[in-house]
Image (cartoon, rainbow, N blue to C red):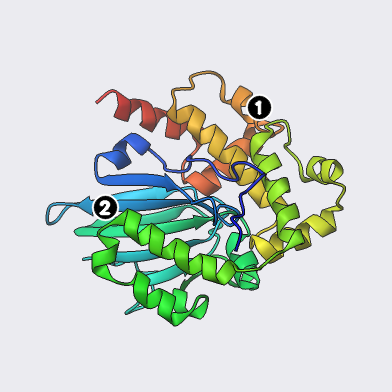
Amino acid sequence: MAARTNATGATASTAGILRPDEFARHAELSRSPAGAEVAHWVENHWALRWNLPEGRSFASQVLPHPTCSLTVELGTHPRPEVPPGEVVVVTGVVTRRFDVDVQGSGRVAGVRFRPGGLAALTGCDASEWTDTVVPARTVLPATTCGVLADPALAEEPASWAGAAEAALLERADGRTDPRYDELLGIVADMLGDRTLVTVAEVGQRHGLSARSLQRLFTRYVGIGPKRVLARYRMHDAVTEIDDGFDGPLLDLAIRYGWYDQAHFTRDFTALVGVAPGAYRHERSAMAAR
């Protein structure tokens, strides 16, 4: 199959980890770009490793991107969402803050798909995976999952990523999906143009009705366009606070599409767990340590 490259640019950022400095004190995270042949469906690869003293734990909190992931997860304390006995899983789009109580030691290697990428590769409806963790063998061939479950392979994230890409390329051979291509362009526009703050603006720019956008996003991403747009803008707002934003929170709210501070505070609190003022105070206190 000829190499296929993604022409739409980034469809995700590296934002999302809450209190990133604190996170970095407990776990080691690395990312690597997807190979050119799978970049149409895959955003990047990532690997996580931790080794905490006995009796110590760390509450990892992440605002997830509107994407699915394929991971191998090996550790002394598996996260409770993972089906018993499974180590290679698919995690669908998560609509709330992603919390993991990190304990003991472990490692994770993963593929982060572009929004809609896994649905386009498999022909499945992404809404079936929303807020769900399923055995990867229910989505991908069992032989693929068996290879990716090898603990020795997981010790070398680059080798694991290569094996994952080889398996995905077999799945992608000859596959074309114009609707997914359309979705990618819309999502890249959402992420790249900060002046887009409403679904109506997105639809007008791309010549689609609100209903058509809803069907497209639900089928491929697993959530509607309003949630995708809001998630990107919330990532922007949290990143500014993490980077030291000390201006009026109303200014931050308006910049990213909220019409008043009350709505911004409500949405921020629902996702992050604390109000933006409290989050900024916590962030400042940690930075001063």
Disc 1 element: helix
Q: Nearer the viewer, residue 203 or 185?
A: 185
Residue 8 in view, yes or no: yes
The quarter holding residue 214 reads bottom right
Assess disc 2: are there few (<14), some (14-19) or many (≥20) residues with their C-alpha within 10 Å of its C-alpha.
some
Q: Residue 146 at x, y = what percent? A: 36, 77
Residue 129 in view, yes or no: no
Disc with the residue nearer the chain's start (1 vs 2): 2
Residue at the (58%, 64%) spot, across then down? 118
Q: Residue 207 at x, y = what percent? A: 87, 47
Residue 50 horizontal side relative to residue 31, left or right: left
Residue at the (61%, 38%) spot, across then down? 233
Examine the rendered structure and indicate whether residue 50 appears above or below residue 24.
below
Q: Disc 2 designates what residue?
A: 49
Q: Disc 1 designates what residue?
A: 255
Figure quadrant of the C terminus: top left
Q: Amino acid at mark 2?
A: Arg
The quarter holding residue 236 reads top right
Residue 191 is marked as: none
Q: Nearer the viewer, residue 77 or 164?
A: 164
Disc 2 element: strand
